[in-house]
Image (spheres, rainbow, N blue to C red):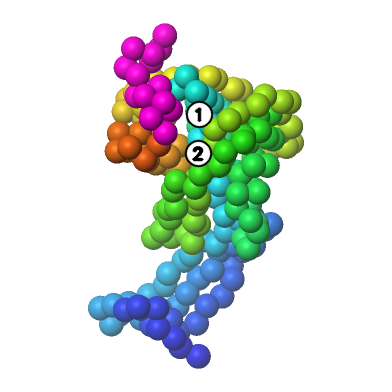
Amino acid sequence: MSKRRGPWQVESSREIYRNPWVSLTEHAVIRPDGAPGIYGVVGFANLALAVLPVFPDGRILLVGQHRFPQDRYSWEIPEGGGPLGADPQAGAVRELREETGYAAENWQEILRMELSNSVTDEAAIGYLATGLTAGEPDPDGTEELALRLVHFREALEDVSSGKISDALTVAMLLRAYYMAREGELAVELATAMLDQGARRA
């Protein structure tokens, strides 16, 4: 039975592939211009979660790891996935602990975004985490991680230069920069994050 998705008419749908993390569905469609076509959509079983851990002196934690699809090393804020329908903050708490060992006293949702929304349904939520306490990381078997403690301004410079290119990390750093500049964060924290003299100290 056909149905409409905005200007698209979906004639039929069939699942091509599924594993515990992603699926691929091919839709036979009538395009907005009236011509027949296909539209492939990658579905995600998890919500993408990101955590920006910020210390009182304006430093943040970055996690380094090899990313299989791009076959390159990437520096990112702590990230992971949480099952759809589960409490996203609880998932973010878990990811921060597993990847860095840290726990945070204060959590603030600062970002919601869609990732590659022309071909996937993946959505993301990002949190600012403060009041950090160190512990032991517990990465899963697919992760070989390194940690760096860098000043917020240094991370911003790495975004500008292209050294940091992970989409969620870029978006979270720019969102936090906006919040710090526009008075949406505590004055002491914002001042420390924006301190030009502290970068690469």
Q: Is residue 34 above or below residue 91?
A: below
The number of discs equals 2
Query: Would you name the residue on which mark 1 appears?
Result: 54
Q: Quadrant of residue 14?
A: bottom right
Q: Nearer the viewer, residue 165 or 152?
A: 152
* CA distance for labels 1 and 2: 7 Å
Q: Quadrant of residue 143?
A: top right
- Residue 88 at what x, y percent from top left? 60, 53
Q: Are marks 1 and 2 in contact (CB under 8 Å)?
A: yes
Q: Nearer the viewer, residue 84 or 92?
A: 92
Residue 118 in sight in this render: yes
- Residue 98 at what x, y percent from top left? 69, 35
Query: Would you name the residue on which mark 2 appears?
Result: 128
84 displayed left or right of 119: right
154 displayed left or right of 51: left
116 displayed left or right of 134: left
* Magenta stretch: helix, strand or loop mostly: helix
